[in-house]
Image (cartoon, grey):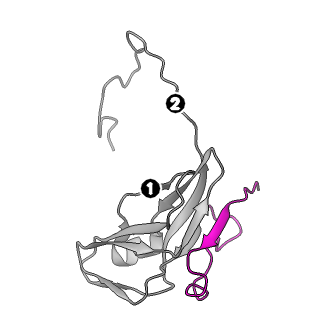
Amino acid sequence: MNTITVNFCWLHPDLNMDIDLPQYHSALASGLDVAAAVVQAVVLQPGQRGLFPTGFAVALPAGYELQVRPRSGLAIKYGVTVLNSPGTIDADYRGEVSIALINLGQEAVTINRGDRIAQLVLAPVLRVQWELCPSLDSTIRGGGGFGHTGR
């Protein structure tokens, strides 16, 4: 497996020593689990959204992004998911990594300090160079939109 070095720093090292570094929880996992660095427990009511601190910042190499994705366990057990999924941490962002969560479930959910709340996936980024053309080639699908190909 390939690895990329990413600069990581705790924003308040003295306050965040009890929070785990984002980490892979299996040998072939693609996502790093990331923990909430809330000062005290936060209750998300059904339909409520919140922005959760992680206590760290990163400096990604040019040509990469960190995608913020939901954790399947939170989604299926409680209906809690990442609001802007997948979220993006750009290579030039240097602020605190924060996670936007929403409770789509039927009951209130408590997020405690250190709870694993999302996954981070490092992904390469390609840049677009537009080529203006008078028309596009035709395909079988054509302009068929949402649900066009059936079940």
Q: Nearer the viewer, residue 135 or 22?
A: 22
Q: Give x and y (percent) for residue 62.
A: 64, 46
Helix, strand or loop for the magenta stretch, by majority: loop
Q: Is residue 93 left or right of residue 81?
A: right
Which residue is depicted at the point 43% across and 87% down?
39
Q: Give x and y (percent) for residue 86.
A: 44, 56
Q: Nearer the viewer, residue 119 or 151?
A: 119
| Residue for badge 1 | 86
Q: Is residue 6 left or right of residue 130?
A: right
> What residue type is disc 2 on?
Val
Q: Quadrant of the C terminus?
A: top left
How far apart are the alpha carbons under marks 2 and 1? Answer: 19 Å
- Residue 139 sits above or below residue 66 on the image: above
> What residue type is disc 1 on?
Pro
Q: Give x and y (percent) for residue 6.
A: 68, 60
Q: Is-magenta flag for residue 15?
A: yes
- Residue 90 sits above or below residue 110 on the image: above
Q: Please report whichever mark, 2 or 1, sits nearer to the chain's N-terminal start.
A: 1
- Residue 16 sits above or below residue 97 on the image: below
Q: Give x and y (percent) for residue 35.
A: 52, 78
Which span of residues is magenta-colored? 2-31
Which is closer to the viewer, label 2 or label 1?
A: 2
Q: Quadrant of residue 40?
A: bottom left
How crowded pointer 2 is (Cα within 10 Å; few <14, some 14-19, many 20+) is rated as few
Residue 139: assigned label? none
Which residue is depicted at the point 75% across and 57% down?
3
| Residue for badge 2 | 128
Q: Element type at marker 1?
A: loop
Which residue is depicted at the point 45% across and 68% down?
98
Q: Are marks 2 and 1 in contact (CB under 8 Å)?
A: no
Q: Quadrant of the N terminus?
A: bottom right
